[in-house]
Amino acid sequence: MGKAVLYVRDEELLESLKNRLSERGYAEIIASGSAGELLVDALEQRPEVAVIEYADGDREIGATVKRLWDKLGIPIIMIAQSCDLQEVQEWGESLVSTILAKPVREEELVAALVLSVAAARRVERLKEEVSTLKESIESRKVIEKAKGRLMERDKLSEAEAFRRMQRLAMDRRISMRQLADAILLTDSIGG
């Protein structure tokens, strides 16, 4: 596995977490001394996950978690006292992957890590897929527009204009999108 960044004030819990993460294959565990250091460390080291201890009324953590999420989008696991869970849930609902109550059992932490990292990877794949689909839709729009210009300019049927574009793209060894861009550019310069 990759790196994990920790911000835990409780020394006993911190050492326990370091050991647990190390045993679970985390190659590098970065222990930050403050919320500000946590953000700096995370931006420099690009961890796969963040584990953060929440203390009652700690507003700096909320702002740090938001910045961490905005800049890196990594899974964030919060550890809090049972009485603080509601407060963390209120400000961290869309930012925090998992909230665990103290004392943290190893099985809970491992399950939270595995599920949070898997979910983050799934989200990343979906973002890439959405980006690819958006590009595909945009290309189709441009190709349709260029096909329409050919139909209008050269008095071709839709099928003839499309076949001409296919042939030209293959002859020039360029994509249909590149050809469509060239047709639209040429048409706008010449028209």
Image: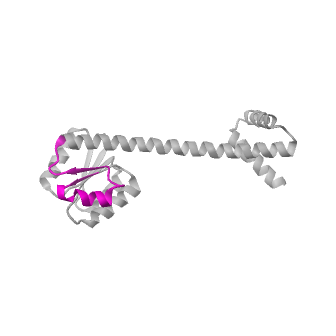
Task: Judge left or right: residue 107 versus residue 122.
Answer: left
User: Where residue 68 sits: x, y (%)?
Assistant: 35, 57
Residue occupying the far left of the picture: 12
Q: Which residues are magenta?
A: 77-106
Residue occupying the far right of the picture: 155
Q: Nearer the viewer, residue 121 or 91?
A: 91
The image quarter containing residue 64 is bottom left
Residue 26 lies in the magenta stretch = no
User: Where residue 145 sits: x, y (%)?
Assistant: 74, 46
Quadrant in which the N terminus appears? top left
Q: Is residue 119 above or below residue 11?
A: above
User: Where residue 173 sits: x, y (%)?
Assistant: 71, 35
Is residue 40 visible to the viewer in this orientation of the structure? no
Task: Judge left or right: residue 174 versus residue 76.
Answer: right
User: Where residue 34 sits: x, y (%)?
Assistant: 24, 62
Residue 104 lies in the magenta stretch = yes
Name which residue lies at 22% across and 59% down. Answer: 54
Is residue 163 visible to the viewer in this orientation of the structure? yes
Task: Judge left or right: residue 41 versus residue 134.
Answer: left
The image quarter containing residue 84 is bottom left
Q: How is the image coloured?
A: one colour
